[in-house]
Image: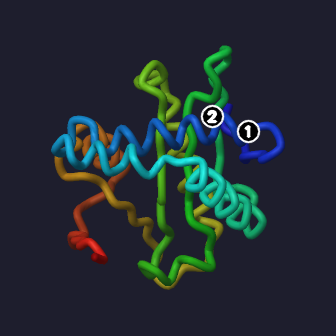
Amino acid sequence: MVRPYDATRDADDLWALKQGFETGLGEGTGSDEKHEVYEAKLTDDYRSRWLDWVARCVDEHERCVQVAEGGDESGHAGYVFVLPESLSFVWDAAVLNEIFVRPEHRGDGVGDDLMDAALAVAHDQDLPLDRMVLDVDRENDRAQAFYERYGFEHWGEMVARDLD
């Protein structure tokens, strides 16, 4: 079951999922350095700041962060985070900021349920362009295949640089 995130009961589980999301970004889709960079940022300060930001986004739209219950003691099976409408001008579209499913729940429909929830949130937004965008690592074949099943196509390419 997918439902809106509730900070009073879900914060610890959401943080555990966020850690899996972040460390998964550098695992198998880049160098050891990439993995270390993503893992190193997961400090107590980052946790506090990220959960505060999540709370502000949820205050704006209660369904922008949703969790999939796991049905066991290991916590939630996954989560999805669609940026609230006020941030849609970043890309002139709905932004699927994060979607993550614990490895033990992959292949059992959780990702589909989360994507359906994300698309429902996007459909409710008044957007400059009627589309949803996301950032996916080109080396993450599993994620690429998942997004292609939902009709996502390459639309430009993101580049980045350090601010040093």
Query: Does 26 sit above or below residue 76?
Result: below
Residue at 18% in and 45% down: 30
Q: Residues within 10 Å of mark 2 (few under 14, many from 20)?
A: many
For the image, the number of numbered tags is 2
Query: Does 162 sit above or below residue 3?
Result: below
- Residue identifier under label 2: 68
Label 1 amino acid? Asp
Residue at 60% in and 55% down: 45
Label 2 amino acid? Ala
Q: Nearer the viewer, mark 1 or mark 2?
A: 1
Q: Secondary structure at mark 1?
A: helix
| Residue located farthest toward the top when viewing the structure as drawn | 72
Q: Residues within 10 Å of mark 1 (few under 14, many from 20)?
A: some
- Mark sitting on residue 31: none
- Between 32 and 53, the residue placed more toward the observer is 32
Q: Quadrant of residue 61?
A: bottom right
Residue 156 position within the rendered picture, expressed as x and y whole percent measured from the top left: 22, 73
Residue 73 position within the rendered picture, expressed as x and y whole percent measured from the top left: 67, 15
- Between 6 and 49, the residue placed more toward the observer is 49
Which quadrant is the C terminus positioned in?
bottom left
Q: Quadrant of residue 161?
A: bottom left
**What's the distance in space between the residues labelled 1 and 2, CA to CA?**
11 Å
Residue 46 position within the rendered picture, expressed as x and y whole percent measured from the top left: 56, 55
* In this rendering, position of residue 9 left or right of residue 98: right
- Residue identifier under label 1: 10
Q: Secondary structure at mark 2?
A: strand
Q: How is the image coloured?
A: rainbow
Query: Does 111 sit above or below residue 47?
Result: above
